[in-house]
Image: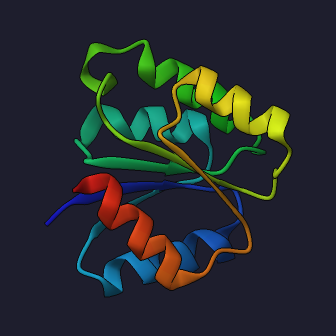
Amino acid sequence: MASILAVDDSASLRQMVAFTLKSSGYHVIEAVDGQDAVEKLREHSVDLVLTDQNMPRMDGLTLVRHLRSQPAFKHVPILVLTTESSDEMKQAGRAAGATGWMVKPFDPKRLIDVVGKVLG
């Protein structure tokens, strides 16, 4: 069973994402922002990180850059799930090392499809 870290400062959205992923058989760890994600990743190993962009303490792109600087996360897929849809933000995401970019509101089936493809 693949393990996924879901990072979002919105409790309701985090719960919807977690429910969607758990319903498809994934183990989900939740974090409230990028700083919380870094702390959770000290205790848990994950197969994929799914993060929001706009969060307090540490935003999504800062989290992506931080994780990519760590040898253990060089090849872990990181998906950004955000309301940000501009080409500039998507390019910044790619430059930071994000594997993919999805725009909220998310379609549960599409999220499962993308996660499945990314995890292979």
> Relative to 113, is 30 above or below?
above
Residue at image point 65% right, 69% down = 11
User: Residue 93 location in percent, x, y?
Assistant: 65, 32
Can the viewer see residue 58 in this picture?
Answer: no
Q: Quadrant of the C terminus?
A: bottom left
User: Residue 79 location in percent, x, y?
Assistant: 51, 48
> Relative to 71, is 104 above or below?
below
User: Residue 107 location in percent, x, y?
Assistant: 60, 81
Q: Quadrant of residue 20?
A: bottom left
> Relative to 95, is 40 above or below?
below
Can the viewer see residue 75 in this picture?
Answer: yes
Foreground: 51 or 93? Answer: 93
Residue at image point 65% right, 38% down = 60
State the scheme by which the image is colored: rainbow
Which residue sits furthest left? 1
Tell me: 19 left or right of 53: left
Foreground: 91 or 46? Answer: 91
Q: Quadrant of residue 19?
A: bottom left
Q: Quadrant of the N terminus?
A: bottom left
Residue at image point 79% right, 36% down = 89
Foreground: 108 or 42? Answer: 108
User: Residue 56 location in percent, x, y?
Assistant: 77, 40
Numbered circles on residues, count = 0
Q: Quadrant of residue 3?
A: bottom left
Residue at image point 57% right, 30% down = 63
> Relative to 78, is 115 above or below?
below
